[in-house]
Image (tube, grey):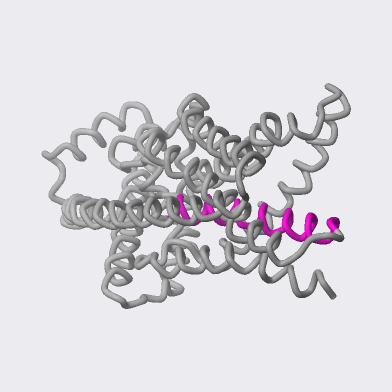
Amino acid sequence: MDLLILAPVGLLPVLIFLVVLVYMDSYKLVGLKTVLAVIAAGGVVTVLSYFSNAYLMDQFDLDRLTLVRYVAPVSEECLKALIIVYLFRSHRIGFLVDSAIMGFAVGAGFGFVENIYYLARDESAHIGVAIVRGFGTAVMHGGVAAIFAIISQTLTERNMKINPVRYLPGLAAAMLLHAGYNYFVLTMPPILMTLVTLMLLPPILHYVFVKSAQHMHEWLQLDFDADAKLLEQINSGQFAQGKIGRFLHDLRDKFEGPVVVDMLCYLRLYTELALRAKGVLMMRENGLDAPVGERTREKFTEMEYLESSIGKTGLLALKPFLHMTRKDLWQLNVLEK
């Protein structure tokens, strides 16, 4: 019965915080199902970190204070980071806004399960403990994971290759902030650290949302015009003397005729979908929502067929015209949701 009373106090703050972040996302970049799946993944990480920390304590004969201050921040942030890196590599994150939401969702799931465990385990837990864990520890887990995602997004958004070095600054920041919180919460009144967390984190995330919205608006305008011009050239058939025409002419010596035709169809289809995705985002920016439609889904099926027909070598040859940065591939996921 005590757990039923204390658990909501320890769980609701971080979930309310996450709901506010999703509500602030005017472009609706992250779907509810995705957020719930990421929260669940964060909860799984809590269980994994429990066993990994227990293993480290046993192997290196660590006392609990050393584990909490120096070891747990490293092991826990590494495990949370794996989920976020997967989201980056699968093109589920394209801007600072969704990186903040996804990162906080991982931390929310982690804090959610951890709070239930500690409140159920500690028979002497009271309302004060639940408040500190809910408004402090759980929000801290979400905040440092969001900071890792934001820094990593900033350093990797223009890089398609997997370069672990670019994730290290964000990971180091998350570990240091986590370790700092654990250190001070053990030496200072816990309620004070809770207040500090609540004072610092919201302004940081609000700044990220404002800057990301400006950046996204500029990106939509510039890339929309570029894609529209490219599609106009392809559909008009007047590209023989242009850059595309010269490129396709060179390909005739390296690929068979039908493959070259498929490559042109793929370029047109990819550009159409990119334009469609940007149009959907522009409508969301103005408070409207546009259904994807069956025709758009059929185009994705056609793209898969063309990819198998062209092959990896052909796709690499087309890469300069496809603008395949991680952000451009992310926009196609907007249509596939």
Residue 69 in which image quadrant: top right
The residue closer to the viewer here, 125 or 225, is 125
Q: Describe residue 324's horizontal placement relative to residue 102 as left or right.
A: left
The magenta stretch spans residue 331:
no
Please determine whether, in this image, residue 287 is positioned above or below residue 241: below
Residue drawn where x is 79% and y is 43% of the image: 50
Quadrant of the drawing holding the N terminus: bottom right
Residue 275 visible to an observer of this rendering: yes
Residue 75 in which image quadrant: top right
Please determine whether, in this image, residue 266 is positioned above or below residue 164: below
The residue closer to the viewer here, 155 or 292, is 155
Q: Magenta: predominant secondary structure element?
A: helix
Residue drawn where x is 36% and y is 43% of the image: 263
The magenta-colored residue range is 98-122
Please determine whether, in this image, residue 32 is positioned above or below residue 194: below
Residue 220 drawn at (x, y percent):
25, 56
Residue 336 drawn at (x, y percent):
48, 62
Residue drawn where x is 58% and y is 43% of the image: 86
Residue 305 visible to an observer of this rendering: no
